[in-house]
Image (tube, helix red, strand yellow):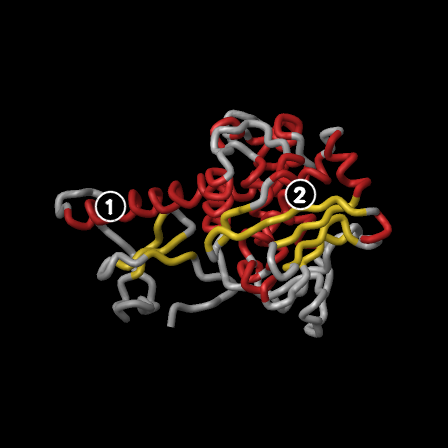
Amino acid sequence: MPGLARAFFYALKEAMLMGDELGSKQRNITMSDDYKVDGLSNAQVRALAKRSRAYLNLSDADFIDVLALEKIDQIWTVLGPKPFRLEVVSDSELPDDSGLTTFDGVHVLTRVRRGLRHDALLGHGYPRFTYAHELGHATLHPKHLLQGASMPRRRQGNTRYNWIPSFQSAEHQAMVFAAAFLINDDTARNLATADEVAIRFGLSLEAARIYFEQLLEEIERPLSAERVRRMADEFKAIVADKDSPTRTISFLDDPCLACSQKQLFPVNGSRYMCRACDRVYDRYQDGDQAG
């Protein structure tokens, strides 16, 4: 991942976190900016989006024509295949929303504004993302929809309730789903910046940001785990080698939280490792102690 793309992502993520709006715990089951739903990790949501692509025979598609969703009469959902309908309605019918997903008694029903459809036809990013976002609700949240929930995408942005964890937020899940649904990973991994991703797949910068967030998680998690394992192996080898000139180790006076032995020693200046049980800790901050 080029350094410029990484810096771009972290700057956007910081701005997103600083800009989160405070929410209320009061909500109406028939209309809400967000819902607390069954928890899913970002990786799980991405996998479900790829399964949706496969069900619609879009696995290898580089650029998805979201208007084709208007011709689909069935989608795969977490509750199995369900009848689906996507309707284009007058702007006056959805004055506050770009899109809205409900259950009409037979179909999982998504409605989008006519003006938004026109912009999607021109290839604009926001409406394309909205189509995929509402498909995310239809795919991930049929249980709530069948119970009477209405899941809109607000034109001015949905309020993100701070009492709902991200992994249980219907809106967060739908955003992650939309990015994963619209982007072909094999192609995107060869692109250097969020701008390139947005242009290649006809997306808003929001969708590109979400993609980079997930991609960095996938890349950095195994690399971090591998670094820790490598450091552990190196220090275990040093301790085991009685003739090693670097065998002298200074232990902390704090006990290990896992085995209670006072055999913690520094690892590469930022972490500590227990010689007794091999557990690795982050460095204690602001005077915090292990015990």
Disc 1 crowd rating (10 Å Cα; few below 14, some 14-19, many 20+) is: few
Q: Is 269 placed above or below 223 here?
A: below
User: Could you tell me residue 6's position as x and y percent?
Assistant: 57, 36
The residue lying at 66 percent from left, 43 percent from top is 131
Task: Say which of marks 2 and 1 sits in front.
Answer: 2
In the image, farthest residue toward the right: 92
Q: Looking at the rendered structure, which numbered label has been put on residue 233?
A: 1
Question: In screen coordinates, is 105 left or right of 287?
Answer: right
Residue at x 20%, y 42% (from the top left corner): 245
Q: Amino acid at mark 2?
A: Tyr
Residue visible at 70% across and 71% down in the picture:
27
Residue 238 picture location, percent across and down: 21, 46
Q: Is residue 269 toward the left or the right of residue 237 in the image?
A: right
Indicate the quadrant where residue 260 lies: bottom left
* Label 2 Cα neighbours within 10 Å, binned few <14 / some 14-19 / many ≥20: many
Q: For mark 2, what is the residue?
A: 131
State how many labels appear.
2
Residue 209 is labelled as none
- Closer to the chain start, of discs 2 and 1, is 2
Marks 2 and 1, how far apart in space? 49 Å
Residue 55, above or below 272 = above
Horizontal arrangement in the rendering, residue 122 relative to residue 131 (left or right): right
Judging depth in this view, the residue of 73 and 208 nearest the camera is 73
Q: Residue at x 68, y 73 (%)?
A: 25
Callout 1 secondary element: helix
Residue 207 or 226: which is nearer the viewer?
207
Front-lying residue, 271 or 147: 147
Q: Quadrant of residue 66?
A: top right
Residue type at the position of mark 1: Asp
Residue 284 percent location from the top left of the image: 45, 61
Quadrant for the C terminus in the image: bottom left
Measured as percent of width and height from the top left, residue 167 is found at 53, 59
